[in-house]
Amino acid sequence: MFEKNRNRPPRLYRFPLAVCALSFGLLMGCDTNGGLPSLAQILEPSPAAPAPQTNDQMAIVNAVDATAAVTQPRVEVIPTLTGMGYASISAQPAKSANQRRLMAIRSARLQAMRNLTEQVHGVQIDSQTTIIDAIVQNDSLRASVDGVILGAKTVRINPVGRDTYEVVLELDQALLSNIMRTVRG
């Protein structure tokens, strides 16, 4: 019933080989004090005998340089901000179809402005939760936006379907650069 598999070496012989290889690798990297070397010790050649860097050391240095270039860009990138707004024509309170259409465009434009304001100035969130006997009784959430948007350009006003208008507004890079310069002082 419990017959050994004669084709497979026992685990006892495979495990110590892996442990020995790992231990040898760690011991080869140890300094004279018995501890593991720091990254600076690995990358910097010793002052007594300046040895050329190995391919592994050069790869590490290149990776550190590439990471620094990505995480600390030297050129400030200022995006173009885009705000979109939608409004339904039939939901507008007007008597004629033309008035409803104009009101829908105006409403979509205001929503696009609010979207831009949220991106530039942020959104303030107020929340309140009432819990009684470990059961949520009331959970309310309120968002508010406060800010001024000057110089937004209308990119497009499109009818979407038969009953909706879409308005896209944009703040260009020059305007955003000026805003950021003013904010930074």
Image: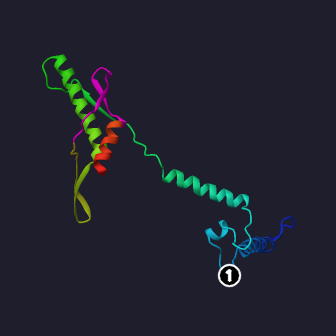
Residue drawn at (25%, 52%), measured in percent from left and top? 125
Q: Say which quarter of the image contains residue 8.
A: bottom right
**Would you place residue 184 above or below residue 88 in this image?**
below
**Would you place residue 17 above or below residue 167 in this image?**
below
Answer with left or right where residue 48 lies relative to residue 121. right
Answer with left or right where residue 143 lies relative to residue 9. left
**Would you place residue 143 above or below residue 42 in this image?**
above
Query: Residue 115 or 3: which is nearer the viewer?
Result: 115
Query: Residue 3 or 46: which is nearer the viewer?
Result: 46
Quadrant where the N terminus sits is: bottom right
Element at label 1? loop
Residue drawn at (62%, 69%), measured in percent from left and top? 40
* Pointer 1 local density, CA inside 10 Å: few below 14, some 14–19, many at least 20: few
Query: Residue 13 or 99: which is nearer the viewer?
Result: 99
Q: Say which quarter of the image contains residue 172.
A: top left
Residue 174 x %, y %: 35, 36
The residue to which callout 1 is attached is 34
**Magenta region, residue range:** 148-173
